[in-house]
Image: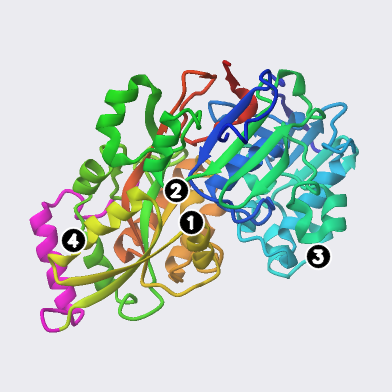
Amino acid sequence: MSSWIKRTALAAVATAALMGAASAEVVYNRANSGEPETLDTHKTSTVQEFHILQDMLEGLVAYDMKAKATPGQAEKWEISDDGKTYRFTLRNGLKWSNGDPVTAEDFVYSYRRIMDPATGAKYANILYPIKNAEKINKGQAKLEELGVKAVDPKTVEITLEQPTPYFIELLTHQTSLPVHKGSVEKFGKDFVKPGNMVTNGAYKLAEFVPNSHIKLVKNENYRDAKNVQIETVNYFPTSDFAAMVRRYEAGELDTTDDVPADQMKSLKERFKDQVQVGPWSGTWYFIVNSSKAPFNDVRVRQALSMAMDREFVADQIWGQTMLPGYSFMPPGVGNYGEPAYMDYKDASPIDREEKAKKLLQEAGFGPGKPLKVEVRYNTTDNNRNTVIAIADQWKQIGIETSFINTDGKTHFAHLRDGGDFDVARYGWIADVNDPSNFLFLLKSDNKGFNSGKYNNPEFDKLLDQAASEMDLKKRADIMRKAEAILMRDMPWIPIMYYGKSHLISPKIKGFEHNTRGIYPTRLLSKVQ
């Protein structure tokens, strides 16, 4: 039996009608910039869904308020000398919200369920580091062959394909949140409805009224319930950021998860230090459908990118809450170094515009035959202002732009399900602080996220090579070559690096800005 290196971490709303409970009840009214498509943790993929899920469910590892991985349902873990096997010891006395004990088998069941092709999990590939996960998910191996097993009721053992330096942080992701087997088997797809959903986190689901609110109430069976100070949290889907600000000002919201960028100056004047702005590890993109003409011509995609004035968009549209983006992933990603930038990053806007015109001419477009582009985007004030500004910039080189906008739930479902488009707005916030979490999006076999159907065997080969490289410096060099290919082929056009802006009421205590945008309600309190 292999020896072990011990890695032990110590377990260190609404309007007045919705809030109508006893005055002593602590209620947190929290804006969420999108409506969840589902609360099935194995079928979700958005940040807005994760905000809700992390309040209701807890994995082996959990986030703290600094977005660091800390013990969750597991009180400690051990890692084998070869870095390929992890053993997690569950805490004593863990219970689901219905009183059932939480056991190691719950995690075995949950990991098998997300890998089961029948589940249709779009995000399953993030867990491919687990032994046989990819084969199972592609129908090439049996569920029982997954590298997750219950050694005993309190011990979960996970075996990897190869050492994965960011694996512990990976387990904080929503794909690693468990589901209650009995509820799934009894209710099927309805197991996520109020009254049916059983949770193991700090809160349980009380109400889900589409386009109105989601109400969570404290789970008294949670392992740390005595320290959970907020008893009720109401999530309000609010994609209209100006309306979000008005509700905040009226006292109907305690926090917002974004603000209208064009109001940033006035917001700072009105709310002063209640406005909190900081970096967020993510990139704002246009996905180009490189599987169909004329967007399968790299010259067209390069021209679309070159003609953008990113500084104008970041400064004037987003009020300096975003930064101009010239690489696929933002600077500061762990295990990486400087990203691979576009080779025209430092060229003047005029030079870029002239080059873009020439590329369009070479591709067969010009005054008599303008390139026509339809841009799809999810409706928010900031997104609308951005796509209109970019359309104005494209107009300078003879591009005609039209728009389709839908709510976020519909927009992202359209992309995930392979719907047709020319160019589509997209954003990616890092799940883990590693370059692989950005680059995997464009692997040719990533049907859940590679919406533009980009297919480059050279790129795929580099990512496969990086996955088996244990030297972090060599691995980073390989990934930088892969990113350079994206900056040449431009299947996704980076436009800005994210910043994150909030309005935070002085009544809310414990809030800390972090680059992951993770703010668990269980770690907050509210002054009445």
Three-letter amino acid code of the residue under disc 4: Asp
For discs 2 and 4, the disc positioned in front in the rendered view: 2
Helix, strand or loop at disc 1? helix
Residue on which disc 1 sits? 408
Helix, strand or loop at disc 3? loop
Residue on which disc 4 sits? 392
Instruction: State the separation of the CA atoms marked 4 and 1.
Output: 24 Å
Residue on which disc 3 sits? 142
Q: Is residue 80 visible?
A: no
Three-letter amino acid code of the residue under disc 3: Lys
Instruction: State the separation of the CA atoms marked 1 and 2.
Output: 8 Å
Q: Is residue 89 above or below residue 424?
A: above
Nearest the eye: 302 or 57: 57
Residue on which disc 2 sits? 239
Comes first in the chain, label 2 or label 4: 2
Query: Quadrant of residue 484 in the image?
Result: bottom left
Instruction: State the separation of the CA atoms marked 3 and 1.
Output: 35 Å
Asked whether the beta carbons under mark 1 and mark 2 sit within 8 Å of each other, the answer is yes
Q: Quadrant of the N terminus?
A: top right
